[in-house]
Image (cartoon, rainbow, N blue to C red):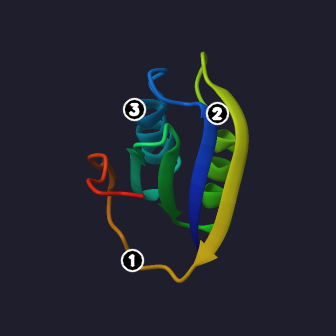
Amino acid sequence: MRKHVIVSGLVQGVFFRDTCRRTAIEHGVSGWVRNLPNGDVEAVFEGTDDSVERLVGWAHHGPRGADVREVEVREEAPEDLRGFEILPTPRGWA
């Protein structure tokens, strides 16, 4: 299973990406997470149905200090990702 999420609210500057990476590794989820220039956080989670749903559930509250207002979730075709990484903020993103 693969889910692509966009998390809005106070989600930058609260260790969202690092905590997301650690939580994903703990649950055996592959993928990536990154900040977006507009203040949102974007992530992709791949793994078993149960583990991916746990990460999506976690994204709805995030780490301590986060104030998640909205989570957009799209299901996508898995790409057989391995590991979980924090990506740089995309340039020229609109």
Decide which of tag 2 and tag 3 comes sooner along the chain.
2
Instruction: Sort mark 3 into few (<14), some (14-19) or many (20+) by Cα contacts within 10 Å.
Output: some
Picture disc at residue 43? none
Q: What residue type is labelled 2?
A: Gly
Q: Report whether 87 appears left or right of 74.
A: left
Number of the label disc, if any, that sits on residue 80: 1
Q: Between 52 and 35, which is closer to the camera in this rendering? A: 35
What is the CA distance from the residue labelled 2 to the residue labelled 3? Answer: 17 Å
Residue 28 visible? The answer is no
x 66%, y 40%: residue: 58
Q: Given the image, on which type of amino acid does mark 3 rest?
A: Asp
Q: In this view, does 78 lie to the left or right of 6?
A: left
Look at label 1 and name its amino acid. Answer: Asp
In the image, residue 50 sits, relative to residue 58, either above or below, namely below
Which residue shows up at 52% across the image and 66% down it? 47
Q: Residue 9 carries which label?
A: 2
The mark nearer the N terminus, 3 or 1, is 3
Task: Name the residue that disc number 3 marks.
Answer: 18
* Quadrant that contains the C terminus: bottom left
Image-quadrant location for residue 73: bottom right
